[in-house]
Amino acid sequence: MSDELLGVDGPEWLRADGADSDVVMSSRVRLARNIAGFPFLSKASDDDRRQTLELVRDRVLSGGISEGMLWVDVAESSEDERHLLVERHLISRQHAKGSGARGAAISAPDERLSIMVNEEDHLRIQVMRSGLAVAEAMTQIDQVDDAIEGQIGYAFSPRFGYLTACPTNVGTGMRVSVMLHLPGLRMTGEIEKVRRAAKSLNLAVRGFYGEGSEASGDLFQISNQTTLGKTERRIVRDFESTILPKVLDYERKSRHALLTRSRLKVVDRSHRALGILQSARLMTAEEALKLISRVRLGVLLGVVEGVELSTLNRLILLTQPAHLQRAVKSTLNQAQRRIARADLCRDRLAGK
């Protein structure tokens, strides 16, 4: 897979330079679209899938959609290459495990834009940005969506909106999600505040890799579940003006409470985590995320110095199995990955 696509330091959304990046790791907007005249994938033949793939690939790569787009033939990629794309949130786990003709167009080198072809729908277009940038992601994806629709007719109903394979996506076909780092709420035992608030607003709270994943390293994804009956702009506005301010306020108050009531505990916990990352010889992926989360909280609260947030954000990605194997240019078993992961953390945090 092209080094131009998979830069060693990770995609743009890991840079920690976006708004409210102390809490919001990334913002994502995703659109589900289907091409008029082609059956949904659940009813599509192998030839239908191939024609869809070729049509989208040719239109996207011919220019006018977005600059710097690279194509990945997901069906022909190795298992390790597909896992790399999943770890970078460029394709879904479903897309990686699927069958038949399928691919992805990805913007390089920032990896902000990716277009999955033949996942659950013919197209899944997504834009990811660093920090709280839902409106910015919406502006970009709107331009891309219009450019594609100008070349490829979408399946659309005047009554129901964009038609999708899953009824829950009918309407705008849009999902807005943010990845949040919530160690304060976790440590104070108040994470249920977020779950209750999300449920009352018909939102989903999931783990690091979305649906079906666990909230490792205190990382959570919050996304809308309703696409019918609301405009795209209304969904974005609700997220930025109603939902996220509450969550950010909850987390920051929890962090302040920890610092004022349990400062020594927070300092000890953060520095113990840093010490382990700097000296351990064996480490699991789950342990790495937990320790990185604790150090990240310490940096944000000013009790750990000399460690950059961007370094910690990138370690979240680089300690994942496929990225470890890419770093050492070898297939590793579980025991070997534990050694390589510890080596990587020591190297990245040496002298910090």
Image (cartoon, rainbow, N blue to C red):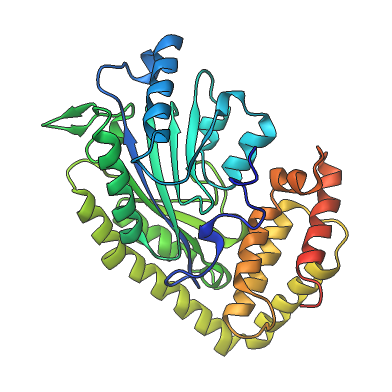
- Report the front residue among 227 and 66: 66
Give residue 261's position: percent from left, percent from top. Answer: 57, 88
Give residue 296's position: percent from left, percent from top. Answer: 62, 72
Residue 36 occupies quadrant: top left
Question: Can you see residue 45?
Answer: no
Give residue 124's position: percent from left, percent from top. Answer: 39, 36
Q: In the displayed image of the protein, which residue is found farthest to the left?
A: 158
Q: In the displayed image of the protein, which residue is found farthest to the right?
A: 281
Give residue 3's position: percent from left, percent from top. Answer: 65, 45
Which residue is painted at 28% across and 40% down in the image?
Answer: 147
Determine whether, in the image, residue 302 is placed left or right of residue 104. right
Question: 183 above or below 50?
Answer: below
Which residue is painted at 28% across and 30% down in the image?
Answer: 167
Question: 77 above or below 127?
Answer: above
Residue 243 occupies quadrant: bottom left
Question: 306 above or below 167?
Answer: below
Question: Can you see residue 127?
Answer: yes
Q: Please give the count of numbered marks on the rendered protein.
A: 0
